[in-house]
Amino acid sequence: MSSPQLPQTTAYLRVTDCSWEGGTLQGEVTAGSFTWEFCWLFSQSRLDIEPSLGRALIQEPLGRFLEQRDYQLEPGGDYQFTIRAQI
């Protein structure tokens, strides 16, 4: 018997600004019907996400993605990652 398929949602991320000197990466992420703006302060390991509606759905998966890929992300770049949840 096969195990049930886990729910998944693809999140789409666009980097709008990056400051290596300031230690920040900014952009927007869309998943399902939600869109958030984020500021990743990688020098402080802090992630700010607005608006607050649905923030709990994206905070952890976005944080993991940014921690793994932050030095590979460039302004103007479009990226995607999978969230193990239905959003």
Image (spheres, grey):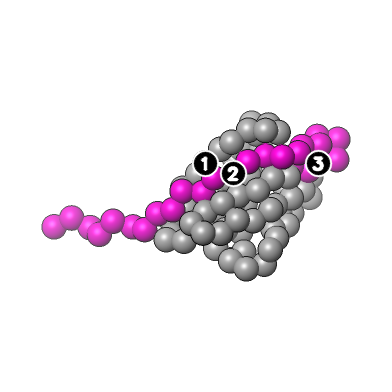
- Give the magenta-colored segment's residue range: 1-25
- The amino acid on which the numbered mark 3 sits, given as a three-letter code, is Gly
- Identify which residue, 15 or 42, lies in the foreground: 15
Q: Is residue 60 above or below residue 69?
A: below
| Residue found at x 85% / y 40% | 22
x and y percent of residue 70 in the render? 66, 38
Q: Identify which residue is drawn at 42% across, 61% down.
A: 86
Disc ID at residue 13: 2
Quadrant of the image occupied by residue 50:
bottom right
Q: What element carries label 1?
A: strand
Pair 3/1: label in front: 1
Going by the image, does 73 lie left or right of 2? Answer: right
Mark 3 or mark 1: which comes first in sequence?
A: 3
In the rendered image, the vertical position of residue 54 relative to residue 18, given as above or below: below
Residue furthest bottom as drawn: 53
Marks 3 and 2: which is nearer the front? 2
Spatial CA distance of label 2 from label 1 is 6 Å
Query: In terms of image quadrants, where is residue 53?
Result: bottom right
Which of the 4 quarters of the picture holds residue 27?
top right
Residue beneath disc 3: 23
The answer to which of marks 3 and 2 sits earlier in the sequence is 2
Residue that badge 1 annotates: 80
Expressed as whole percent of the image width and height from the top left, the position of residue 46 reads 74, 54
The x and y percentages for residue 72 are 64, 31
Q: Which amino acid does label 1 sit on?
A: Gln
Report whether residue 79 is seen.
yes
> Mark 2–mark 1 contact, CB under 8 Å?
yes
- Dot 3 falls on a residue whose secondary structure is loop
Question: Dot 1, crowdedness within 10 Å: few (<14), some or many (≥20)?
Answer: some
